Image: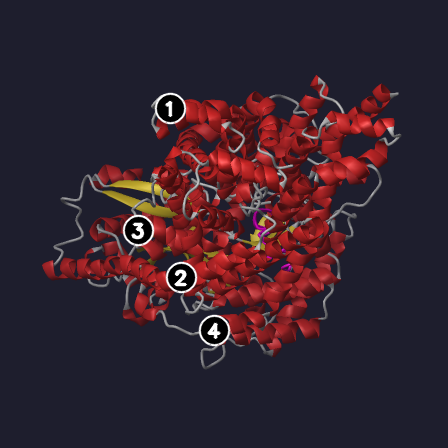
Amino acid sequence: MGVLGRQEVTTAAVPARPTHHEPGSTNTSRKQRISAATKSLTPYGFVAPSFLFLLAFGILPIVVAAVVSFTDLDITGLANPDNISYIGLENYRRLISDSDFWRSLQTTGIFIVFGVPSIIVISLTIALGLSVSSSRLFRVLRMFYFLPAITAIVAISLIWGFMYNTQFGLLNYLLTSIGSSPINWLSDPQMAKVSVAIVAIWRATGLNIIIFLAAIQSIPRDYYEAAAIDGATGWASFRWITFPLLRFALLFVTVTTLIAWLQFFDEPFVLTDGGPVGATTSISLFIYQEGFSFNRFGYASAGTVVLFLIIVTVTAFQLRLYRSNHA
Amino acid sequence: MRNARVRLIGAGLALGALLTAFPFVWMVFTSLKPLNEARTYPPKILPSTVEWGSYLTLFRELDFGRYTVNTIIVVMVGFIGMFFMAMAGYGFAKFEFRGRRAMFLLVLTTLMIPVQVTLIPTYLILNSVGLTNTVVGIAMPTLVSAFGIFLFRQFMETLPTEILDAARLDGAGEFRIFLSVALPMSTPILAVMTILTFIAGWNSFIWPLVIAGQQENYTLSVGLALLNQQVSINPALQMAGASLMVIPTIVLFVLLQRHIVQGFTMSGIN
Amino acid sequence: MRLTNWRPLTTALAVMLVLTACGGVSESENSTESTTPVTSATTDASVTETTQGVVSGTTDGLAGTTLNFWIMGDTATAFEELVSGFTAETGINVKVDAIPWDAVNDRLTTAVASGEGPDVTQIGLSLLPTFIAGEALMDVSDLVGDYPNLTAASFPSDIMATLNPGGATYSFPWVSDTRVLFYRSDILGDAGFSEPPATWDELLKMASVLADRGSTKYGYYIPQWDAPLPVAYTWQAGGDVIAADGSIDLDTPEFRDAVDHYLAFYDAGVVPTAGDWDQALGFITGDAPMLVSGPYLAGAINDQAPELEGSWGVTMVPTGVNNTSLFAGSNVGVWSGSENPEAALALIDYLARPETQLAWYAAVNELPAVSAALEELKAGDDAMVAVYAAQLANSRLLPLDPAWDAVGQEILTMLNSVALTGADKGQALADLFDSVARIVEG
């Protein structure tokens, strides 16, 4: 998912908790931070360049979108501002009664329900496997798993489109050679959801594997040794040591994966263009199509704002859940 | 017994790794086939003869040489952004200042903004500063990412403040301390961010498409998209273009990979 | 800061939204302001040109200028060769930018928003209403008199008037395109058919016979993305998608006939259900030996399978009530912000020369839009050209309505939902009429 520009990064990004220190240690590190430069302008100097860029290309566009969502801006309005008029909440009203919008929400929901657990389970399993040894072989294997994450989405669409192809694709050849009947990977509305999700999962696991692996490796060995003395190995040591100590990594991966699925765009955009019959049209893609295929920018902006609010709400809810479980 | 288990896991992982990497193998093999062989059914795994023709077409007829140069420029500009992110991460990690908390929250909020759907406002902003239709402009919207700032901050919090203070006592300026003390101590996170910055610039697609304006500013992604035609496709040519995009990222990743897990480990997402 | 404390996050968001909403108004004003001067500058420019009075269509004094040209799809290399003659003649350079077909809308939008486009652009006819509504094209009525190849008489019948509403002159036909029936005479012959199908019924019957050749064989191919196809079927059924009062109207017996005809092939299982079907390859392998497509397909077949020559042909589309086909193609027009309208028109004039038109056909198999070139092509002994020309004479334009694009997509969605997911046809039609009504009312 999300490998266009800044998107890329959102696959693994998270609202922060700085470290997993206990509250006490946070206080000490704060004290350490305080230095002679506290009152000067220096810190602003360090932060300002990045901050200004984020304001200009992160915050400002959504603000503009919010304003535009109250207008009927279309291509005539872009050409000539006289053609723009304020229409209040009309776009939002239409959005609520638009069955295509609800359908795209539903489609996104389906992707989330299957996609988030798949990505977490697959990445965690592979990361646990990779962590059992630090031999050269395992380090090489790790690289293989990361490859999809660093590949350009356009290249991915060509490679997978080619493998999925109905006429000369490799996958159908393999299926028929084991006696199974060929599949319309990207043309059957049910199957297309699966095919698109397979590519998204294939691409998203790499970064998450690295994050889990980093977290697993930072668990002190002696915890396991102590547990082994008490007779806890295998599943028990995973259940009682690894899993609890991975909880922040799990939160991180869950939040970022969920955001990425909520913004799901790239794979259906390049593989199916939302089809067949709208079966793979996610919310982002719906908004994009309203905006660019049909030039209804005011309407699309209303969708943008709604999607943004959904993401903020879902994320806040997750963080709250995390806090009530682990406070 | 433990060895047997490790071997079993290793075998399972190797199988998974082969499956994961197989599309790339298929891509490279196909790129070396002549057109009719790339589209035969049943498909042949190995090319019968190795043909470099598709690669030659890309460079001789399709200007991929220029697209490659442009892509490299976009990546270079991206590294300026990486420097800014390192500065910001350092600022957030090692200084206490008014509004720090709010500013950092705002930074993280940008992660939740769906990017593809705010194309037009972003385009208008770039246009108002005259950066549309330029290669440099392509890199602007993605120059700084909240994720990068977050990673830098996480890592730099672990740098010992005593060493920074010692440098201050020696009379070094703040920027100097950042450059010659903090940055050299941050190799693992710099490795992580190098690869992330590289792939962000190298792979970016929507922005080059919208901002490049003229073909002389196109990047590899856009050139590759031009190969996707509705009437009839040429898989050998497409796969050659895809290989051209993918192989450099793989090489860079292999070079940096030992630092990457370390970088994430030390940035404390655990 | 701790993640576990989410309250500041939401508060910050709320505050930010409120604060920036106020700031945002001025921002959007700023950004629209930045486009305003461009638009007015354009009008000023064209006014100045005309008041100065352009002496003639000559290109004296224009040598050394550079024109930017947007071309859609993958024909940029051929086009650069085509215009090398123009540069040699006039000294005007032409810089060609290829726009992927998928990205045309994005590029148009951003160019309109910023006022920064090319000097000359190719415009697919389906996008022409959008280009005009977006004020992307310059009205060159006052300049065009100096260019001999650009008179309305150069082009077939009243096409200039049809494509340039309101008495303006925004663009000129460049290439014509129509849809004809491609068929594999060898495969049809093996199945006992000496002639291609001439009617809807024959098409369906023959397709069914051909599909019985094997489990991966089909009789016909329907591109799932081909929005004009159901409209052409409606015409062939004797109807139209536009009512007498000019509004979009699909609730007609003829449209229902078209829908039935479209779906009949899926019911009979004689067309591939794959959306990623490569029509050229399917035709060359014979897996789908009949389909309705444009002359560009002939080009692809000749390139990829020259050995097939003589075992395939083209003919007029099968008749329902009549055999009207789609008139498509591309125009070229001067971008509203161009600073070189004379040079741009000189280029368009060059493109409209019969010999240029013929050279383009030879290069990429796109049919001429200029009458003289078409006549000359017909006079040759190419049997396929004769079919194209005959079909062009019996073809119609899609509705020139900016809303049509969205309607066309809805029709496709409706048809494919019945064909691919087995949705109920009556319900799907009712839904279609609803959504069309919503699109039309805006």
Residue B11 coordinates in the image, percent (x, y): 80, 25
Element type at mark 2: helix
Tell me what residue is drawn at x 29 percent, y 50 percent: C119
Residue A304 coordinates in the image, percent (x, y): 51, 60
Q: State the extent of the magenta-drawn residues as a range.
A: A263-282
Amino acid type shown at disc 2: Leu
Q: Label for residue C137? A: none
2 or 4: mark nearer the eye: 2
Tell me what residue is drawn at x 63 percent, y 52 percent: A319
Q: Chain of mark 4?
A: A
Residue A86 seen anywhere in this rendered image of the structure: yes
Amino acid type shown at disc 4: Leu
Q: Which residue is mark 2?
A: C19
Q: Separation of disc 2 and disc 1 at Cα?
A: 42 Å
Q: Separation of disc 2 and disc 3 at Cα?
A: 22 Å
**Along the polypeptide, which appears first: circle 3 or circle 1?**
3
Q: Label for residue B169? A: 1
User: Looking at the image, which is closer to me, A146 or C17?
Assistant: C17
Label 2 neighbourhood size at 10 Å, few (<14), some (14-19), many (20+)? few
User: Looking at the image, which is closer to me, B108 or A56?
Assistant: B108
3 or 1: mark nearer the eye: 1
Q: Are marks 2 and 1 in contact (CB under 8 Å)?
A: no
- Residue found farthest to the top: A136
Q: Label for residue B128? A: 3
A259 inside magenta stretch: no
